[in-house]
Amino acid sequence: MQEKTVNSSAIIILTSLGFFMSMIDSMIVTTATTAIRNNFQISVNLLQWLLNSYNITIAALLLVGVSLGEKIGRKKVYLVGIAIFTIASICCALSNNIIELIISRMIQAVGACVMTPMSMAILTHSLPANIRGKALGIWSGIGGLALIVGPVLGGFIVATLSWQWIFWINLPIGIITIYFSHILLPESKGKEDKLNFTDLLLITISSAGIIWSLSEITTQTSHVITTITGLSCLVLGILFIIRQKMTTTPMIPLILFHSKVFTNGNIATFLLYASMFGVLFFLPQYFLVFEKTNPLIAGLQLLPWTATLVVIAPFAGNAVDKFGEKIIATLGLFLQGIGYLLIILLVNVTNSYIAMAIPLMIAGMGLSMAGPALQKSVLSAVEPIYLGKASGIYNIFRLFGGAIGTTISVIIFNIFGGITNSIAFAHGFDAVLITTGVISLLGIVFSLKLTTRRKL
């Protein structure tokens, strides 16, 4: 009995470590963006690809990674994912220019795209039902901890060492996790899905090309190449959708979108995270450029926002069960949008940090409420056989929402502001907050079409 308890604890710890690594890497870089931009002397347009390349690659490969794990073994794929992620982290730290860093980030994402779903699958499959719920709660909590630790840790590292060390710290964690996971984690397989690499190429090239075209359209005097690229990639995206309709083993089963709840839930998710990631990209830079704080202080100043996500999320889950997905998702989208808009109103009246901290807490509460509500709504709208695919599609909408939101925010920032001086930066940031606030409020149009399910 004692041995079983030890094994269960080891499974929880080792799967949570992989989830934590993939989550923290998307957050830790936020407080290092200004240091990286100054180091490489690059524009904000190019800098956005530090986040976008990571999110796009994970979204494009997520379902493929899940299929590989189900086919050849979840533990094997999990270990390979951590190994790729760790090696790519070394490449990130050794990068001599932004292009090398972006490519290394994409390789990181190749590993990360399987670390989260495989860690959850191993945990769920390996533990008895009577402790599975508690274990998943711990797993989610450790992943949520990355939201708090990431920006602060990134700020501390940049302030005391250099930005390269935000990637070097993955090396010892990765090696330890691989070693003990190989010894202690059990192997399991699931239902095999046929892999279609044509669809993989189509979704990757089309999504990356469309986002690149959007980001470049405002920075070039000649738009011919950008427009042609964007339209060509849009055609590839349409071709991908047509192939999903024709094939018997689609990467994204279009039949799921026959459900209005599933469709509206995913669109609202897209808008929720488009709003959040647009602010996430610029807020640390605002603290560093406009308020002249150091990276550590900038990380700490994000805590009212990021810590709220972890504190409120457990209560939000209970609220969804009690009041239904539609009410909680709508309220969450409203609070996030209002929170971002309030920052402009309050900060322009007073320069006090509290004037920003309170709206950030409101926005964080909104995200914490809408996220679980929309996830439950999407997954509850499909038959059990489609749960794996539905979860993957939900995460694709979440990640692409983040990428598109970042790109739109950069476009708005360049139109209304710039990085030439702190005043121009503040004007651009104000425009970003208005845009992201409106995007979140737009999500209410779709959340109101959800079904209200309550726990009986």
Image (cartoon, grey):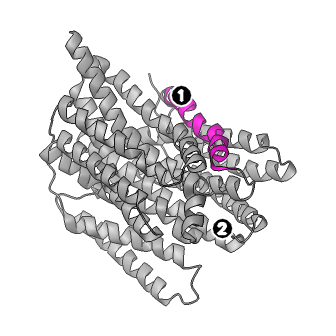
> On screen, 95 above or below 255?
below
Query: Measuring 53% from the left and 33% from the top, which residue is drawn there?
Result: 310
- Please name the residue shown 52% across and 54% down the image: 163
Main SS of the magenta part reads: helix
Does residue 37 appear to the left or right of 251 in the view shown? right
Of 422 and 436, the residue lying toward us: 422
Which of pointers 1 and 2 indicates the residue nearer the eye?
2
The image quarter containing residue 128 is: top left
Q: What stretch is highlighted in magenta?
A: 294-320
- Residue 369 is tagged as none
Q: Is mark 2 on a helix, strand or loop?
A: helix
Image check: 158 left or right of 270? right
Residue wearing tag 1: 319
Q: Dot 1, how many residues are within 10 Å of its Cα: few (below 14), some (14-19), or many (20+)? A: some
For numbered disc 1, what is the local secondary structure? helix
Q: What amino acid does circle 1 point to?
A: Ala
The answer for how far apart the CA atoms under marks 1 and 2 are is 36 Å
Q: Residue 420: x, y in percent? A: 72, 72
Q: Does the magenta stretch include residue 299?
A: yes
